[in-house]
Image (cartoon, helix red, strand yellow):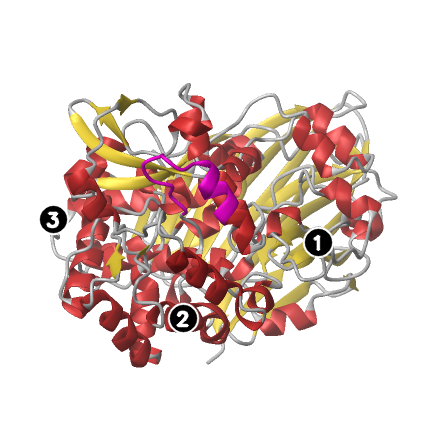
Amino acid sequence: MGNKDEIIERIYERSYLPFLKILDAHPKISVNLHYTGFLLDWFEKNHSEFIDLLRKVVERRQVELIGGAYFEPIIAVIPNGDARGQTRLLSEKITSIFGVKPAGFWTAERAWEPQLPEILSEVGGGHTFVDDISFESAGLVESDCFEPYAVESRGSFVSVFPILKKLRYCIPFQPVSKTISYLRAARGASIAVYADDGEKFGAWPSTYEQVYERGWLESFFAKIESQSWIETVKVSEYLKSHPANKRIYLPASTYSEMMEWAIPLNGSEIQRIKRGAPIKKIEASIPHRGFWRLFLAKYPESARMYSKMLAISKNLHTLGDSAETDPIIDLWKGQCNDAYWHGVFGGLYATILRRITYQNLIRAQVSYERKTFGSKEDWLSISENSFSQTREINLDSKNFGAVVVPSAGGSICELDFKPLHLNMVDTLARRPERYHGEVRKKSNRTIVPGRKKNQSESIHESSRSKEKGLKELLVYDRYPKFAFVDYLVSPDSEIDSFAKQDFVEVGPLPSCRYEVQIQKSNQSAKAIQTSGIRTGKGIDIRITKEVTVFAREPKLKVEYSIESHGKELDALFVPEINLGSLFDQTFLENYKENKILSSENFDITYGDLGARTRISSPGAKRIWAIPVRTVSLSEEGFESNLQGISVLPSYELQLSSGEHSFKTVIELDVQKTE
């Protein structure tokens, strides 16, 4: 979900179509294919000839279509009702197009959890595929992984096939002879399963040349056909004569690379990364393996989307809609897994994927609110997020929604402009990644040393750099990139100290915890937050921070009152308002450099999305605007992404023995520009 048509079109031309054409030319080769519901929709809309070709190979019983959840969620972490609905929807789609029911279940990212047999049995997924490392974690060895196993949970069984990692790394990156030699060495085994991304056949870097221009796939199929001791099979037919009789229990797991990506960094790793340690040395020091849910611990931004998804699912299902209504479909689109994690692909770092996820979730939320409040224009709602580990207060109106986090300095972690279904605070904090040590040590390396000229390079082995100057962008944030993250800093602080994150804090405002009172009238909903802190110089300060959402205006007002007691306070008060780039091209062009403004207002334009955000900060000495660029890894190599912009009005705070208080108001409003 979220990719542009031109991107999918390129992958279609370089991977999906040529693969199927060559498969069609080798009718003796049987394969099992899984397509997401989103991709089938795209084929129907843009390339009906592909559907016709796929129908042809299905009808001649060369291809078996594997089922799954329509929008490719991590099935174990979404509500069971949504899992049932998404699976049913894809099954109905496949049946309507191809006249057959899907066989088995494709578990997205092969993310396995012990309770999955219950879910898969319930949705009709009699068999699935999980990486061999999951079986090895259960005590088996590689030679045991050439047959399916029966896996049980509370009386429900599913047949699970081990996916052989050695085949994943051979196909299509190594010469065809390597795969044949591996299979020959395993002769006498029952079944050897290769299952992996179809995009590896042409869409990954250098694979189009390897797979098609140099003829790897054609040679592979021809070689398989010439070996009398190898038979390609459709999995459901194989199970009829070779049922899974051996029982085993698998721990929570996924493929080996993802289990490393998911593990949060420890302090020792972070220090080694900052010193430029190679990624292989850092990975070698990882003492254990994680599983998919650890991404929700590693990236709070992912956990925030996840908790929003759960809340919306709960609300929508209370309405009693059993059919696949539009808001339910929007929710399911928002469950697509790609934006929730990061590894060798952009994932969570890709601003367009997060934007699309939030748009789908907010659209579903708006539908729920429309059914709840009807046509009323000036409704207001105050609620608390029951799916977050910390207290979060939701202030909602028809046009606006703010999520206030009292335990994080009273900041705002989400700000929804509902007419365009945008989360304006959709940003990502800059944090160390294990591959950042590689970025510090090198800039441009395109081929792994020792790789043969005509041999394709796996993404997992790549260390390309797409652009220069990435090392200078390796700045790490102290706090989440929320809105209204407040600082008391040294009075001589300048824009560079915030850009480099080396400013000196006078008091711990961003991490202070606020007590909250809620007020609601016909016109506004308000969270009144109060807290007390002690500065590094022993000055006691009391702060009041009032956050107001209005019934009829897409506007947020934040009022501050700061009082000191007993001693003089000389500092800068700097609220940081982080706004996401939202993959808007106007934003990406206009906010690439630091800006210093002497005015009290700052407008941020989203030309493609048709929105304009204005921040009004009367009394501010100046406004700093700093782009937030992350350095991440995508399938094409190391790259930077403009995640958003930090807007920082600064106020001179000089509280003497005769003047103990400071007050100011900041307003943020969002308008459609079309």
Disc 3 versus disc 2: nearer the observer: 2
Front residue of 549/276: it is 276
Secondary structure beneath label 2: helix
Q: Is residue 80 left or right of residue 47?
A: left
Residue at the location (83% across, 38% down)?
Answer: 490
Element assignment for label 3: loop
Decide which of tag 3 and tag 1 comes sooner along the chain: 3
Asked where in the image residue 155 lies, by quadrant, the reply is top left
In the figure, 214 relative to 188: above or below? Answer: below
Q: Which residues are magenta?
A: 180-194
Position of residue 407 measured from the top left corner of the image (x, y, whole percent): 52, 30
Viewer-proximal residue, 429 or 433? 433
Mark 1 lies on residue: 649
Between the C-alphas of marks 3 and 2, the distance is 47 Å
Give x and y (percent) for residue 81. Answer: 19, 43
Residue 491 seen in the current view:
yes
Which residue is tagged 2? 22
In the depicted view, which residue is nearer to us: 309 or 541?
309
Magenta segment, prevailing SS (helix, strand or loop): loop
Residue name at image x 17 percent, y 43 percent: 123
Residue that carries the numbered disc 3 in the rendered image: 320
Closer to the eye: label 3 or 1: 3
